[in-house]
Image (cartoon, helix red, strand yellow):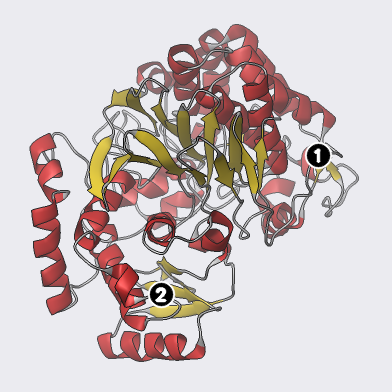
Amino acid sequence: MSALPPAVLGPKPTVSGRDGLVVTSHPYAAHAGADALAAGGNAVDAVLAAAAAQLIVEPHMTSLTGGLSVLSRTADGVARYLNGNVHAPLAPLPGFGGDDLTTGRGVPVPGWWPAFREASETLGRLGVERTLAPAIAVAHEGFPVNPFLFALMYGSQANLGSHEQMLPVFFPGGGLLCPGDILVQHQAGRTLERLATEGDRYYLGDFARAFVAENRRGGGVIAVEDFERARPRWDAPVTGRYRGLDLLASAPPDDGGQMLAEALAMLDSVDLAGMGRPTESFETLRLLIEVHDEVYYATPRRGEPYLSAEELAELRSPDHGAARLAAVRAGRRGLSAAALPTPGTIHVSAVDADGGVASLTHSHMASAWVNGLFAEGFQLAGGGSFFQRGMPAPGEKAAVYLAPHVLLRDGRPAIVGGSPSVSLVACVLQNIVNLVDFGMPIAESVAAPRFGARPHDPAFGWRPGVMLENGFPPEIAGAFRDWTARERLWSRVVGPWYTLMGNYEGIVLDAGGTATASADPRRVGSAEAVR
């Protein structure tokens, strides 16, 4: 651990390599992924090892009780999407609303472990015991609390300090751990050890029973039968085209990939390079915001049985994109007033020496430790916030706007990426434009100021609208304020490198196969290449 880069906010170094590379939001997780590659694993093994480590080193952002989805493209060109997101329980949740999100009713049926196991068995080389090993080690050995983690711990003291499982973990000496103190999670480590050796026998047995008992204590309705019926699903990735590159992305009901493809179809007919960067041209910034809002605030693209594959493909077509762009430019459309989910997600991207790539997003899909419910060393995820986008049918997966993606140039991966947070679609869209249209190096792209979605209002919560980071030139920021005031668009200017603007975990690959990444300054991440 001491030899790894420190877990700090701010700019990160650029890292390159030809034998494999991993980028994510914590140095230990990036190291776990790179170590899996060095041990003979492929890109899927790398993202799984990193994701498992993040259960321990980023417990404020993910949980074994949340969801996990993987976009994979192997070296021989086979692309698959594994949706391991959360389900609604089989029992009904009448009158579900925002007040439920801090109770057991706001806890979904998990999808994390079934997807992890399925991805490892179907796409990986190393097996679950090997990919879980770094997570188990750091759970028992501990790691230093970084300032970002501490900030979330400090704000969640009431829930952490009132539960018998978390009190000895986060308050071992009677007071809250501080930055630099070592966080040890023996119970979580034992849970991962049992998953590594017993697999579903433990997960559908002791783990499910403990989860259900805690969920019911909090007022939830989940039963062991929900665990037995919840399965990951395989889908063909969403496809699209942008500037001659082929897009692969998450498939509905993980609908961020569909949003991204629709937005890029709208922008493909526009000479953004001629208009100038968003930091140079307010017209570029405004257009990107309008295109983003057109897709992000639309009705969720759940897919079958709500929309056919043909209808989804039409929404991504160039002709439809051009017509839609003309409508957007003719006048803003109203933004949906529907309740919107809360933040809490992380992402991992990896490329292996053979040219295989993987992009994984996983999450507890809520604010950190939101409900004060814990089982087997892990928080019960509050991802029922995504039920507010539209309550799934009993046992059905939630519609979650994840956007892991791959861009191919002449059939070879050129960009592999994804992002967490409330603004993840905006983050991904802007970074693709930065890299493709403006030719920015990856370190410059992730550090550039951004706009984001859904500013937080203390009185109303997460509202439809737009945020803007400090860092834009005064004339651009002034034009933004004037425009949003004229349009009566709810807006907010926030501090630079604001974490809720997303955290682009991107890798770019040149024609010779060299991969390059730089972790986003908005979180404490790192990129690591195989040496």
Q: Residue visible at 43% across and 55% down?
A: 424
Residue pointed to by mark 2: 278
Residue type at mark 2? Answer: Pro
Furthest residue in direction right, as rendered: 173
Kindly indicate the quadrant of the structure image that contains residue 36. Answer: top right
Disc with the residue nearer the chain's start (1 vs 2): 1
Q: Nearer the viewer, mark 1 or mark 2?
A: 2
Q: Is residue 373 visible?
A: no
Between 107 and 421, the one lying in front of the other is 421
Residue type at mark 1? Answer: Phe
Q: Residue visible at 53% across and 47% down?
A: 505
Residue pointed to by mark 1: 143
Left of 449 or right of it: where is 386?
left
Q: Dot 2: what SS?
A: loop
Q: Residue visible at 36% across and 58% down?
A: 340
Counting every numbered tag in the picture gives 2
Q: What distance separates the C-alpha of mark 1 from that of mark 2?
A: 39 Å
Residues at marks 1 and 2 touching, judged by CB atoms closer than 8 Å: no
Q: Quadrant of the N terminus?
A: top right
Q: Is residue 153 above or below residue 254?
A: below
